Amino acid sequence: MVSTDEPWAFGYQRFGNDDLADHLLTIARYRANRALRELHRYPFGSRWGEDPEAVRWLDRATDAGTAVEIMIKHILAKVTPVLILDTKKITRNSILHLTGRSDVVARLSANNDPAPIDALDVATIGASEAVDLVAKMWSSGARFSVRDAKAILNVRNAAIHLGMLSRSTMLTTMLKFIDVMAALVEEAGAPSDFWSVSVSSIERKIRSNTPISVVLQQKIDNARAVAGGKHSMDDFTFMTYLGLTSEEPGELGSTYARDDLPHWRQVMCPTCVSAGVMWGVLVPGSVEYQEDPESGGTLYWIDDEARPALYKCGHCELELTRAEIGEYGIVQRNFSDSWLIGTRDPTSAELNAYLDRYE
């Protein structure tokens, strides 16, 4: 019969609660190093049709997210294994296992079957909840970003459950992973040989291959920090005139007038939900027409539009270039590709060019 002092199983080994934290550290270390080592081994620029590298990205995201979760549970288990229990699904047997009384669990089982001493069916704390708990207990001077840790876990979940991960998301996530793991390693007091890879050289490689998304993410993070440091949005930087445009500026015309970018509109800031300003450049529309039922003739007109060129939010101080505005739009933010600034009659040259082409 298997000893009831060893409720945990891994491979050919069994161990007790006293060794649980060390086991979790070993697995977290393995996953973390593999995430960066395998990322470093392959090119970052492969396309799906040319190389299965995109599939490997899913593995790296899985390794990174798992390393963060297991490292956090290692920190909790060092305090007491009971902290890794899921309090929403807690059972008497779970408590008994993690307080070192697996022998009672065995006696409570029918026919004294030794199988119930295996604690692998113990419901453990969810990853996001574990992040919050570790942050509450944080004691080291390392900066631990709860938001980044949860972002890594979310990307891990998307990789596992949907099999989806873009190149830019993978690279951005791995940079966050390096920072989050560095903080967790310090908090855990892990051995100096935790990393078996050169983290700094891998980080340089990631940054040298990273598109604008990392720069954009840094701007977003900084803007959130600025907004978070303000006690209220009831000041002059929190603008409540959402929807005003350069064509209907109200009293704000002089405030937002720019000679180089005459067209603007206010839109909700995707970072702090206050009202920011989007400036745009003129993009002449194409000639459109419809038959006039009254005169029997044809009516021609042009809808001119403005294309985003610059965005600023006075509250969180987020500032985006044209390329960054487009990138933020890709992830379903509230920036549209362009907006209508006016309807006009076509000039003679525009109308003649249209008629020569289509008639």
Image (tube, rainbow, N blue to C red):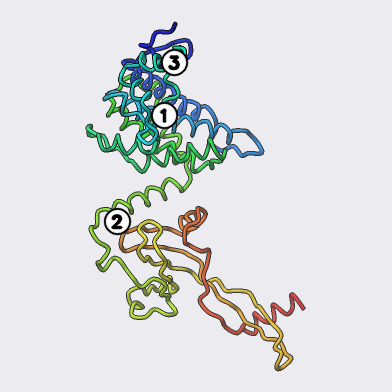
Instruction: Tell me whether the residue at label 2 lies in contact with that at label 3, contact meaning CB atoms closer than 8 angstroms.
Output: no
Residue located at (30% from left, 51% from top): 225
> Which residue position holds label 3?
9
Q: Quadrant of the image for the C terminus?
A: bottom right
Which of the numbered marks, if any, corresponds to residue 123? 1
In front of the other: 291 or 43: 291
Give the Cα distance between marks 1 and 2: 38 Å
In front of the other: 21 or 36: 21
- Frontmost of labels 2 and 3 is 3
First in sequence: mark 3 or mark 1? 3
Instruction: Tell me whether the residue at label 3 lies in contact with that at label 1, contact meaning CB atoms closer than 8 angstroms.
Output: no
Give the Cα distance between marks 3 and 1: 15 Å
Across and down, in percent, residue 54 comes to 58, 36
Dot 2 alpha-carbon crowd within 10 angstroms: few under 14, some 14 to 19, many 20 or more: many
Secondary element under disc 2, as helix, strand or loop, is helix
Across and down, in percent, residue 336 comes to 51, 64
Q: Quadrant of the image for the N terminus?
A: top left
Q: Amino acid at mark 2?
A: Ala
To which quarter of the image does residue 45 belong? top right
To which quarter of the image does residue 190 belong? top left
Q: Is residue 302 shown above or below 179?
A: below
Secondary element under disc 3, as helix, strand or loop, is strand
Across and down, in percent, residue 144 comes to 30, 37
> Which residue position holds label 2?
227
For this orientation, the residue located farthest to the front is 111
Q: Amino acid at mark 3?
A: Ala
Residue located at (47% from left, 40% from top): 155
